[in-house]
Image (tube, rainbow, N blue to C red):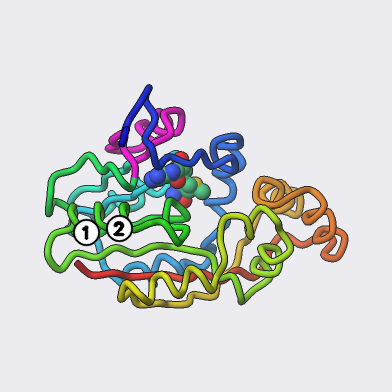
């Protein structure tokens, strides 16, 4: 099997939301945890203070400086070469992917994968690779959408793009079979204004789905948003 050819990892799936719209995705990242609920839940699952944390599929590296505030080391791994260039301006990064992590065995304490790679089924190779780089007792936390709770879940249900990639039942069953702990975090997306929320929604959902939501919710700059965290300890 060819693992890496012409600069492309075999498991790389280009993410159009961030790859085609990196500046709008910045606004999304700024909006997704306005009250710090996700951040607190991540700390509770596996605190990275004084430890080595890997942001797997780090995109433009938005979260790297935030981890670096108190991590011993924060490393981003990203397969998209264009996004990698941006991430390199923010922190320590390596070109790699979930199935090809360019780090030594047992060298990382905490791995986060935010909306990256782990869209079950078909993720066992990446999970094995994460287990390889985790130190004994280290933790993987996968940050996923809650497909059942919150207004964002309603948009996911209405979107053929989302259902082509992912279903909540398949995801839950896959992680359960692998012994993951499941944690729900209800939060919201809060943008600076309605135009910004609409712009962000347009990189995530087809135009007609967003049109319908905007028509039904004029002037809104916030929507309710559920996260699900899947935690695996090595
Ligand atoms: C929706 S973006 C999220 C980016 C970043 N985690 C964030 O929250 O800002 C998904 C990311 O996963 C990356 N990706 C695609 N295939 C991957 C793979 N096989 N392993 C790791 N990351 C992958 C994409 O290039 C993209 O940067």
Farthest residue to the right: give it: 215
* Figure check: 173 above or below 129: below
Residue 209: image location, x then y, percent = 78, 56
Residue 205: image location, x then y, percent = 70, 52
User: Which quadrant of the view contains residue 46?
Assistant: bottom left
Residue 143: image location, x then y, percent = 43, 62
What number is the disc on residue 127?
2
Residue 153: image location, x then y, percent = 64, 69
Q: Are marks 1 and 2 in contact (CB under 8 Å)?
A: yes
Quarter placement of the C terminus: bottom left
Identify the magenta region. Answer: 78-97
Q: Secondary structure at mark 2?
A: helix
Q: CA distance from mark 1 to mark 2?
A: 6 Å
Tag 1 residue: 131
For the image shown, how many numbered marks are present on the structure?
A: 2
Quarter placement of the N terminus: top left
């Amino acid at each position: 099997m060819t693992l890496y050819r012409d600069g492309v990892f075999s498991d790389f799936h280009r993410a159009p939301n961030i790859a085609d719209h990196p500046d709008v995705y910045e606004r999304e990242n700024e909006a997704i945890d306005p009250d710090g609920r996700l951040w607190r839940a991540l700390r509770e699952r596996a605190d990275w203070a004084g430890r080595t944390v890997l942001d797997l599929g780090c995109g433009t590296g938005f979260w790297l400086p935030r981890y670096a505030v108190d991590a011993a080391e924060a490393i981003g791994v990203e397969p998209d070469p264009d996004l990698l260039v941006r991430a390199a301006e923010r922190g320590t990064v390596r070109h790699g992917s979930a199935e090809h992590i360019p780090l030594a065995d047992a060298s990382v304490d905490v791995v986060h994968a935010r909306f990256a790679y782990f869209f079950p089924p078909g993720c066992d190779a990446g999970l094995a690779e994460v287990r390889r780089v985790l130190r004994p007792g280290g933790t993987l936390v996968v940050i996923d959408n809650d497909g059942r709770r919150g207004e964002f879940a309603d948009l996911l249900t209405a979107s053929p793009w989302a259902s082509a990639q992912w279903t909540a039942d398949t995801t839950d069953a896959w992680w359960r079979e692998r012994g993951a702990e499941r944690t729900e975090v209800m939060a919201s997306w809060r943008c600076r204004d309605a135009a910004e929320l609409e712009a962000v929604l347009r990189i995530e959902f087809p135009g007609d789905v967003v049109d319908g939501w905007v028509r039904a919710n004029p002037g809104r700059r916030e929507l309710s948003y559920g996260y699900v965290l899947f935690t695996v300890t090595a």
